Amino acid sequence: MTISRRKFLSTSTLSVAAMAAAGIVCAEELPKDIKWNQTCSLLIIGTGFAGLAAALESHYIGMKDVLVIDKMPIPGGNSAVNGGGVAAAGTDMQEKAGIKDNPDLLYSDILKAGGGLAHPALARRIADESVANYKWLRDEVGVKFKAVYFHGGHSVPRSHQVVENSGSGYIIPMLKKCQEFGIKVQLKTKVVELITNDKGCVVGVKARRDYKFGDENSGTVDYIRATNGVLIASGGFSRNIKMRESHDPRLDKRFGSTNQPGATGEMIQMAQRIGANTIHMDWIQLGPWTSPDEDGFGNAPLFVEASVGYGPMVDIKTGKRFVQETGNRKVRADAIVAMGHPALIYNSEANVKKKVLGVNMTQEQFDKALKDGVIRKFNTIKEIADYYKIPAKALEEENELFNKYIREKKDPQFNCMFFPDSQENNKGPFYACRLWPRVHHTMGGLEINDKAEVLSVAGEPIKGLYAAGEATGGVHGMVRLGTVAVADCMIFGRTAARTAKKFGGC
């Protein structure tokens, strides 16, 4: 039986680049029957933090004809629904607040949380460029910051919050800059194949334009030539249940996700088909601050992350604390999952007014969470116990003990970090929120070097292919610290643009 070369390329999972990685030489050229419908310099797949940062950096360094595409009808991806903070170590805002921080401390925190699995060169780049990235966002993009707050696992408060309290505070000004600079952003365009030449270099993509999410036969075929290469900035695979179960069988359909529906990871798989290596795929992070009383990311995380170190987290069945409230995400999420039922965190109104409202949540967001029953108000600790069917005496005793730890600023049980302005939870009203983890961030993805080049299974850069953001692995290790991923996306998105400008495509 004779198989045409065209049919072979479209059906074989062992592509040109994969054969090259395996030592099989293919001397044939790119199929002559491809008609390029569009040509650009750098093709960026994804309109989140990484993709838009790369697009803007491309403009600033003089690269013309950049094209940004996204399969979804609305730009921003997960970035648009992000909590709004970006990590930076050693900023003017921290100095003004009396917070001592530096890149070495951030680097150390990333490695510690990552359990030794974070690739040092990648973590180092994030730490060293975090302040420059913060200044770039503020001075060049026009992002408005309002406060610095603490995220579990960090040594000091270094999460810089935008006035919008969500990722839209970055995405909207970045999109405005793209429009101002004439950078084309093309939505409803799904990549279905990475196209390589006879040497395994990525020269463009086959896509479906006017794609309707969920209908894989929708749209028309569009071939896009990328003279300076292709950047995968398409995010992770938290919404792909089959893919995540493959790496962690526990994470079946019982676990929801904080991610938008398009986080399905197919670009990672497409890169694998041309010989790309993946790492840390079975490290999938659950968010310990989501609530079973709302869907998606919601408002609960904004309340919870500003409450740790001020209010206790307790087991609803016993009324007892069970974990370090200021611990990293994995520590807290694993502890809740191990209990097998939701946990509860609560805080006094005095602490809520001081640390939640105006820092992580607007009054409007807080009021909506109250109206929706995500956050509930109680006058006494006994009212909390009665409503959630918690043993009242046990909860009252635990509250008194936690207040003692707050006074002494020391927790001999779980080593919770207390902040200088934390107040005892001894006077109502109190605000409480139930917690049950959701799949939040896929730590694994395509292996890259510190130039944002995608590496093959042989450990060599695949020419013409770059990646940044949650589509990559190795940056954080087994646990990602809150708001570090925002810096990761932007720093490596910008890095990819500079690499593509310097080294070009094929």
Image: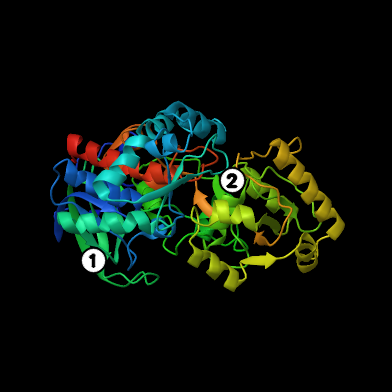
Q: Which residue is mark 2?
A: 329
The answer to whether residue 484 is above or below residue 237 is above
Which one is nearer the viewer's eye here, 217 or 55?
Answer: 55
Closer to the chain start, of discs 1 and 2, is: 1
Q: Look at label 2 and name its amino acid.
A: Arg
Name the residue beneath numbered marker 1: 221
Give the image quarter of residue 341.
bottom right
Q: Is residue 84 left or right of residue 248?
A: left
Q: Is residue 281 visible?
A: yes
Q: Position of residue 396 (x, y in %)?
A: 82, 54
Residue positioned 84% across, 60% down in the render: 392
Name the residue at 76% across, 68% down: 387
How far from the left and from the top, in percent, is residue 50? 33, 48
Between marks 1 and 2 in the image, the one whose residue lies nearer the viewer: 2
| Local SS, label 1 | strand
Of 111 and 464, nearer the camera is: 111
Q: Secondary structure at mark 2?
A: helix
Looking at the rendered image, the quarter that the N terminus falls into is bottom left
Q: Which of the image's four quarters has the C terminus?
A: top left
Mark 2: few/some/many CA within 10 Å (<14, 14-19, 20+): many
